[in-house]
Structure formats: C-alpha cells, structure tokens
Image: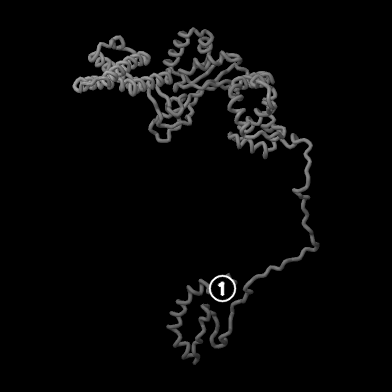
Amino acid sequence: MLKRGLSKKSWLADFLKPLFIMFFKKVHKKIVLSSKMKLPHNIFRKGRFFMSNLATTNEHYNTQLALPLEVKEENVASKRQVTPTFKPYDNRQVQVIFDIQELIPEHHVARVVDEMVEAVPDELLFSHYKGGGRSSYHPKMMLKIILYAYSQKVYSCRGIEKLIKENIPAMWLAAMQQPDFRTINEFRGQRMKQMMDELFEAMILKLIEENYITMENYFLDGTKMEANANKYSFVWKKSTDRLKGKLKEKIQETLRKIEEISELEAKSYQMESEIAPSQLEEVAHQLEETVEALTKEVENETNTEVRKEKRKELRKWKKPLKLIREDYLPRLAKYNQQNETFGDRNSYSKTDKDATFMRMKEDHMKNGQLKPGYNVQMGTENQFILFYTIHQRPTDTRCFIPHFEKLASSSLPMPKNTSSQMQDMGAKKTMYMRLEKRKSLDLIFLYLMGPT
C-alpha cells in the first residue's frame, strides 16, 4: 500500500481531501491571526495531506516514511554452475528393430485378434479361393487387419490402408505387408461376405472350447437400426393394392369397350380376381393386328367418304391399344413387382428395398415417424454375442421363431434355457400357437422351459 501511494494518488487522500478543505476554511482565519503566518499554498501537494506543525516545518517537510518505488530482487548466484543434460536424440540415425512384437503390450487387443483368427481352420478360408494367377495376400492376415481396424473404429478401406502404414500393432498383424485400399475392399466386399457366418460360428465354438461361454443361458433381445435410406422413399402395400384394384377396373372397362366395337373375344380375359400381364399382352397383340389391317385398308381406299369412315374406325382401335401398351401393361408390371418385393411386409424403401418402415427408439421429432430400418435380434451370454439374425419385421414376437430356426440350422449347439422380453400372456399364447403350427417340437420345448 505504501509503495502504491508514492507512485500515484492514494484513494484515502482523495477521500479525506474535501473534508480537510472544509475544516481549514472554517479555522484558517483564527490560525493566521494567532500565528501571523499564511497557510502554505502546497499543503495538499500532489494530492497528499501531511499532518505537521505549520510553525516549525517548511514546505519540503514530510513525516511519511519513504519506500523505494521498486523492490528489486537480487538473484542469488548459485554456488556451482550446473549444465543441463539430455537423453541422446537423433531421429536420422538408423534404428534397427529386431522384433516388432516386443513393442506391443501383453494384453493388447491386437493379440486377442491374432489369437482368435489363428484358431480358425485354414480350410475354412482357403475354400473361397479358386487358385491360379498371382499370389494373393493371406486371408488370415487380411482378416486380422480388418477386425483390428474395426476395434479402433476405423471402417473405411483408405483408413485401414493408412493404419497398417502408421500403427505398430497393425504393422505386426500385417507382418509389415501393405495391401492397398482396393485389395482390402475386394476382400471385405466379396470373400469376407461369403465366409462371415462360418467365421462367426468358428469363433463362438472357440469361446465354448475355452470355457468363456456354456450355451446354457441364452438371453435374447432385439434392437432396431435405421437404414441408410431416404426417409420419404416409402412404398405402402395398402396403397399398392388400392391402385392395382383401380387399374383392374379400368382394364375391365377397356375390354368391355373393345367387345362393343368388334367381334374380338375379349370376354374371356375379363377376370374378377387377377389379370395376368401375358393375357393383356395377347389382347394388345390382337389389337395391333386389327390396327395394321385397317391401316392398309385406309391406304388402299380411293373413295374419300369411305376412307374417312375407315379412319374414324381406326382411331377407335388405336385408343385402347395405346392405353394397354403405354399405361396398363407398365403399371401392372410395376404393381406386381412391388408385391413381390413386399413379401409378408407392409412397406419398403425405394432406395433400400430390404428395409422396412418401423418406429425407432431415437425419435428426435417426437412424432412417432416411421423410418426405414431393420430389427436385429441378438442372443448373449457372459457379455458375448452368441448368435444374431437380421429381420424385416418390426415386432420381436414375429422374429422369435425365425431366429431360433436359423440357430438350429447352424453348427452351434442349442441353448438349454432362453430368456426374452416377451412377458405378456398374449404374446406367449401367440408364440406357442405359431410354434405348434410349424411343428417345431424342439423350439416348443425350449420356449416352454425358458423363463419367459
């Protein structure tokens, strides 16, 4: 505080200055008359008031102790001079690594990937190569680097290529080989896609052999995953059936008009339930023959009135032919194709025809919007995924039977007990009826013995 007062105006002096001015205005006359002295003009010098006897002090008198403006710290010199030392560093010196494996920690995830892939029989991987041509990269090496990259959240082929050039565990798994992104994409998109189910089952059998899982308790649950498709590219089965019904009515009406204007036996094609495109194609073929014959008659006719009548009749035949060729047949083929795509579903996406519109858990708009997606059913035990199936049905109850039927057709053993989230009695009764209808005795026993 003292050092600050010497450098600039003190806040205390600024506060007391007006008070002392008022005081001396009242008593200065008395002081001057008694001492016969004038009040010094610099009593408030530099904003500070000094309490001193005016009769015995001069204008330079100061009772305040003066302190240095700056407190300088003296650097105490060390008794001995110490030179800094560093570890040897030269990144341009040749470094020799005799075993890159020694640089990887003992419990690193790369060692787990290496051990699991090495447990897969070679015959399982070699069966997907036809032989001949240039030597291919070893399938186990390709599989290791892909699985390790997935564990590091690297999914693109170019990212995996960069990983095996810069990441030490990936270099070790690749044995210092460097396949490019095209080779990785070809292996992942073609060969790995064919062997995926067999590889998964082989790894589950390895976990059973190592006593990590027992397949005694099977906990089944499902989750919905949104597809990478346009949210507004939906096709609804009800709309397709409605439009197809209206189209059939138009076709029947056109066939009745054809009957009225000719002796063509179109009555045999008037079907109430279903009209085959081949039958409609045959009608169009007969109409084309008629139009062609009338065209020749019009060209050969010399009488103007008769020619005008024939042209009028020709237009009557061309109109239904144009409707059948350009409207009815393409739309009928379109609706039939859509019904084949539906299967037992009620909807699908135009940009991903395997996806079904269903309600997702992540509803950001809070309006129950239907989005294209899949229902993934997974069975787990001891935090391991034992088996999985991907379904186009939105409800878990309709996925129970297909899931276990696919599990029974695999090389994995059937579980002894099963548990799922189908708790209500209505779902249990429906499930039992479906199992009984399919005569799946093993699944009926499994379902009844389970804790659901």
Q: Residue 339's x, y, as percent? A: 40, 19
Report the front residue among 323 and 383. 323
Task: Say which amino acid is labelled 1.
Answer: Gly
Name which quarter of the figure residue 385 lies in.
top right
Left or right of residue 364: residue 285:
left
Figure coloring = one colour
44 vs 220: above or below: below
Report the front residue among 323 and 376. 323
Q: Residue 366's x, y, as percent? A: 39, 34
Farthest residue in the front direction?
302
Left or right of residue 279: residue 210:
right
291 vs 157: above or below: above
Farthest residue in the right direction?
80
Name which quarter of the figure residue 79 lies in.
bottom right
Q: Residues within 10 Å of mark 1 (few under 14, many from 20)?
A: some
Q: Quadrant of the N terminus?
A: bottom right
What residue do we see at 25% from left, 11% from top? Answer: 263
Report the front residue among 142 and 136. 136
Report the front residue among 206 and 128. 128
Q: Residue 261's x, y, as percent? A: 23, 15
What residue do we see at 23% from left, 20% from top? Answer: 310
Q: Residue 24's x, y, as percent? A: 46, 82
Where disc 1 sits, the SS reads: helix
Q: Which residue is the site of mark 1?
A: 5
Q: Does residue 442 appear in the picture of this structure?
A: yes
Q: Does residue 381 appear in the picture of this structure?
A: no
Name which quarter of the figure residue 278 lies in.
top left
What residue do we see at 52% from left, 11% from top? Answer: 443
Left or right of residue 71: residue 37:
left
